[in-house]
Amino acid sequence: MSATREDVGGTPLPPGWAKPAHQPDAFELTTTTFAERAAKTMARPFARGAIANATDHAAALTTARFVGTDHEALREEARKIRAHAIANLPDYLDQWIDQAERKGTIVHYAADESEARRIVAQICTDQQITRVVKSKSMASEEVSLNSALEAVGVDIYETDLGEFVVQAMGDRPGHVIAPILHRTKDEVHELFSAMAGHELPNEAEALTAFAREGLRHAFLTADAGISGGNFLIAETGDVLLVTNEGNGRLTTSLPPIHIALVGIEKVLPRRRDLAVLLPLLTGHGTGQQITTYVSVSAGPRRQGEPDGPEQMHVVLLDAGRSALLGGEFEEALHCIRCGACQNVCPVYRQVGGHAYGWVYGGPIGAVLTPLFRGQEEAGELAQATTLCGACDDVCPVKIPLHDLLLNLRRRSDAEGHVPRHEQVAFALWAQVWSRPLLYRASTAVARGSLRALARNGVVSAKSPLLRRWTAGRDLVVGKRPR
Ligand code: SF4
């Protein structure tokens, strides 16, 4: 008697696992403003604390990782590699496609998000795929792949633990590398206990074991695995994936079909470029020397090989990327999605990833989202920065994020998206602050006004004049009273 899907994984699926939860698409840009979305996070004090702690920790790990190395030389080398790859992207993509097809990979090209959804849904329909395991993929978030597959009757199980939690909560990832950095262990405990149908111990090991049990079923019974890709190696036609949980490797090698959805800008010319890019990606992402797993997908299983998928598809996603080639924003394509700029950004650290309204948060989100979604929808994100330059200093491939944000602001102004009153206010401000006498006079007036508003050295949220500024924190004038 042949085994059923539910037999294959050993014990039966726990009650809450029978059907994966629906995850909302990452599109809040048209329905809410940045301020409204940020206010939601600001209203959850724990989330703010959790984000600040997690990003502090990640930034410290990154700093420690490169002590004793010539970090600056490595970054400069990485910048050159990425700049060369993107400047010659059409050639390297052709080379990658040629090599990948020689290895039996079926390559598709998606000009935009709807085409990517259609291609993957078509593969699922043609191959009668009804259950999919998915490794973390920001490209799939960009195209809202999950809802497209749900529409053709496919059950999707996110298998990265953080992604699995946000899916089960009906939430969205809050960070490129750490999707649940805005969530608490207690929230995960409550969720998993509800899925299990009984109270689980509120301990990380027990909660992880619960997820592992269900995910094992999903891996063993899936018809296909869907992944992203950290790099496409033009020289070999391979897709490279880094993970820490092993879920990427299981997703790409256990089910009979592997579908990778990868942005076209992920191309690297040669395998040896990984010697520079890989330590920077992992060091800036998680502070590790190298991630626990580095998986290379090199086409379907060949004759005589004991494992690997029988079919491998790669969907190359353009969706606004090629439009940036040769222009003033080309450097945004150098990004390797390490998340380091989010960790050091004083805006992201207060408002979290959801405030950016789409897939990417922090400085790179404030750059990419207006470029991919358009000025009308997302132009205001270029204002979500203090222009302190911390993101420039930390970026492993030296993207001048601060300059790109300024360029976006200039473009917004040139296209007439800046309101008249704002133009007049900034013109006046520039006139005043470019004259030393007026600058000193204006700052003296500001200091005096703040002192008049303060009580015991603090302007609190009760002050009607500065309510928007002080709604989420006290404004300390001079020394904070003890
Ligand atoms: S812009 Fe730089 S720091 Fe930010 S995610 Fe991309 S590579 Fe990392």
Image (tube, rainbow, N blue to C red):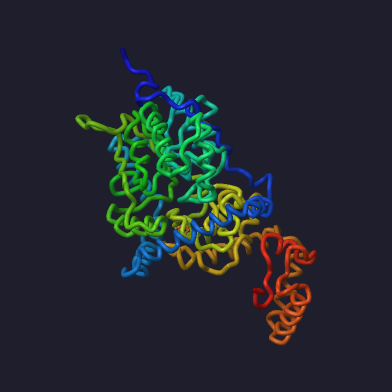
Placement of 189 over or under 356, stated as above or below: above
Residue 259 on image: x %, y %? 40, 35
Residue drawn at x 65%, y 56% as measured from the top left: 380
In the displayed structure image, the side of residue 170 where residue 201 appears, left or right: left
Q: Quadrant of residue 458?
A: bottom right
Residue at the farthest top position: 1
Placement of 258 over or under 279, stated as above or below: above
Say which quadrant the N terminus sits in: top left
In the displayed structure image, the side of residue 120 where residue 373 appears, left or right: right
Q: Nearer the viewer, residue 9 or 361?
A: 9
Residue 369 on image: x %, y %? 57, 52
Residue 63 seen by the camera? yes
Placement of 72 over or under 222, stated as above or below: below
Residue drawn at x 26%, y 32% as measured from the top left: 307
Residue at the farthest bottom position: 437
Residue 414 seen by the camera? no
Residue drawn at x 47%, y 39% as measured from the top left: 164
Residue 7 on image: x %, y %? 36, 21
Q: Nearer the viewer, residue 426 or 200?
A: 200
Say which quadrant the C terminus sits in: bottom right
In the displayed structure image, the side of residue 331 where residue 247 appears, left or right: left
Residue 303 on image: x %, y %? 21, 29
Q: Quadrant of residue 216?
A: top left
